[in-house]
Image: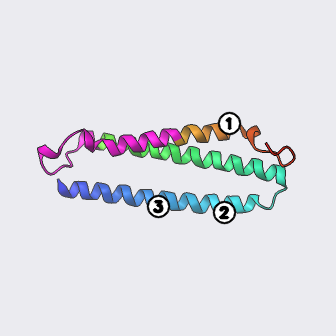
Amino acid sequence: MAETYYYMWEFVTSMTIIILVAAYIIHDRIRLRFEKLEEPERQQRITWLKGITMTILGVLAMLGGSSWVAFILTHKIYISEELAGFHDKVPGIIMAAIGLLVLISGIKKYRRPEDVPDANNNK
């Protein structure tokens, strides 16, 4: 059972790093394309990009946290019965809660691009 725990941590850590690095590279490349645009459209597109990125990362974090909890409920990953408990599910619950917050923030940014500060108004 200890090896299951090790492989689960290895998988979760590796996937998290790969997803975050890929998201950073993709976000950076798209943002560089938007830098060539005129000011009002550039700010609107960058805010839209932030919203989309936050929404996607939020969904992935929620799926990851939910998958963690589902895995804990269906597999025994602890070494002994004394080590089993609610704390096994806490990382997944926290990950899903953070994902939900990021998802909500991303949807708000994505759905309301008119809240972008205008270059002339300086909101």
Camera-side residue of 117 and 70: 117
Q: Which residues are magenta?
A: 72-101
Q: What residue sits right under mark 2 in the picture? A: 29
Q: Secondary structure at mark 1?
A: helix
Task: Give x and y (percent) for residue 83.
Answer: 16, 46
User: Tag 3: residue type?
Assistant: Ile
Q: CA distance from mark 3 to mark 1?
A: 28 Å
Q: Which mark is residue 111?
A: 1
User: Tag 1: residue type?
Assistant: Arg
Q: Residue at x 17, y 53 (%)?
A: 1
User: Tag 2: residue type?
Assistant: Arg
Task: Give x and y (percent) for residue 72.
Answer: 27, 43
Task: Give x and y (percent) for residue 35.
Answer: 76, 60
Q: Are the residues at dot 1 and dot 2 in contact (C-beta closer than 8 Å)?
A: no
Task: Give x and y (percent) for residue 106.
Answer: 60, 42
Q: Residues within 10 Å of mark 1 (few under 14, many from 20)?
A: few
Identify the colour scheme used: rainbow
Q: Residue at x 35, y 57 (%)?
A: 11
Identify the image quadrant of the C terminus. Answer: top right
Q: Are the residues at dot 2 and dot 3 in contact (C-beta closer than 8 Å)?
A: no
Q: Residues within 10 Å of mark 2 (few under 14, many from 20)?
A: few
Q: Secondary structure at mark 3?
A: helix
Horizontally, residue 9 falls left or right of residue 84, namely right
Quadrant in the rendering for residue 75: top left
**Quick one: which residue is furthest to the right in this view?**
120
Horizontally, residue 41 falls left or right of residue 20, namely right
Horizontally, residue 50 falls left or right of residue 8, namely right
Q: Residue at x 76, y 47 (%)?
A: 44
Q: What residue sits right under mark 3 in the picture? A: 18
Which numbered disc, 3 or 1, marks the residue that appears first in the sequence? 3
Q: Residue at x 64, y 49 (%)?
A: 50
Up-down relation of residue 11 to residue 102 (above or below):
below
